[in-house]
Image: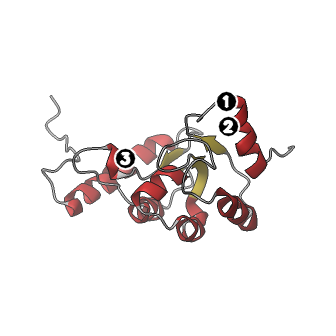
Amino acid sequence: MAANACALSGNFSHAEQYANLLAQTERILRLVEQTSIEVRVECLSRNHFIGAMAVHTPQVAVDWVRRMHHPQFRFTFDSYHQQRGAGDLLTTLTTSFDVISGVHIGDAPTRQEPGTGEINFTNLAISLRELGYDGEIGLEFMPSQDEASALAAVHRLFPLTED
């Protein structure tokens, strides 16, 4: 039994949860420093989870990464969760670009490929190019029809580049 365990739950204030999160992250990052692992965090939209979450907005997630100020601790920009939870995709992308290490795409509200929902992926792709993003783009969606059509929609917006 771990007597010093502290859960992130509704039993603690948000400030207490966040302080615990920061303290535990410092401990984890000391271990991570001994590896080549990159730890990434993202905010999750509350409409998928019941109960309190310590990191439920991109502002909190980005603040967390910036406070840790560690090269192996980065933010993943998830278009689906961003749109469902906070909206304002382009502003968040631009203001948090310095800590972004991955981008996940999935349209909202159905979490399908680009072009099936309300996100303007053309503008998102343009912004990523203008910012100079050259990292990975994760496909976090279920195809609305067949996989080939979904991948074609992604490829039109985010063409593969040769290394």
The CA span between labels 3 and 2 is 41 Å
Residue 45 at least partly seen: yes
Frontmost residue, 139 versus 6: 139
- Residue 45 is left or right of residue 70, and the answer is left
- Residue 39 is left or right of residue 120, and the answer is left
Q: Residue tagged by mark 3?
A: 27
- Mark 1 or 3: in front is 1
- Residue 91 is left or right of residue 42, and the answer is right
- Asked whether disc 3 touches disc 2, contact meaning CB atoms under 8 Å apart, the reply is no
- Residue 132 is left or right of residue 9, and the answer is right
Residue 133 location, quadrant? bottom right
In the image, residue 138 lies at what x, y percent?
62, 42
Dot 3 amino acid type: Arg
Dot 1 amino acid type: Glu
Q: Residue at 72% x, 44% y: name it.
A: 153
The CA span between labels 1 and 2 is 5 Å
In the image, residue 14 lies at what x, y percent?
22, 60
- Mark 3 or 2: in front is 2
- Quarter of the figure with the N terminus: top left
When the figure is inspected, residue 3 is found, relative to residue 16, above or below; the finding is above
For marks 3 and 2 on the same chain, the one whose residue lies earlier in the sequence: 3
Give the residue at the far right of this rendering.
162
The CA span between labels 1 and 3 is 41 Å
Question: Could you say which disc has been placed on residue 150 in the image?
Answer: 2
Residue 130 location, quadrant? bottom right
Q: Residue at 19% x, 40% y: name it.
A: 5
In the image, residue 19 lies at what x, y percent?
27, 59
For marks 1 and 3 on the same chain, the one whose residue lies earlier in the sequence: 3
Frontmost residue, 141 versus 18: 141
Q: Residue at 60% x, 34% y: name it.
A: 143
Q: Residue tagged by mark 1?
A: 147
Q: Residues within 10 Å of mark 2 (few under 14, many from 20)?
A: many
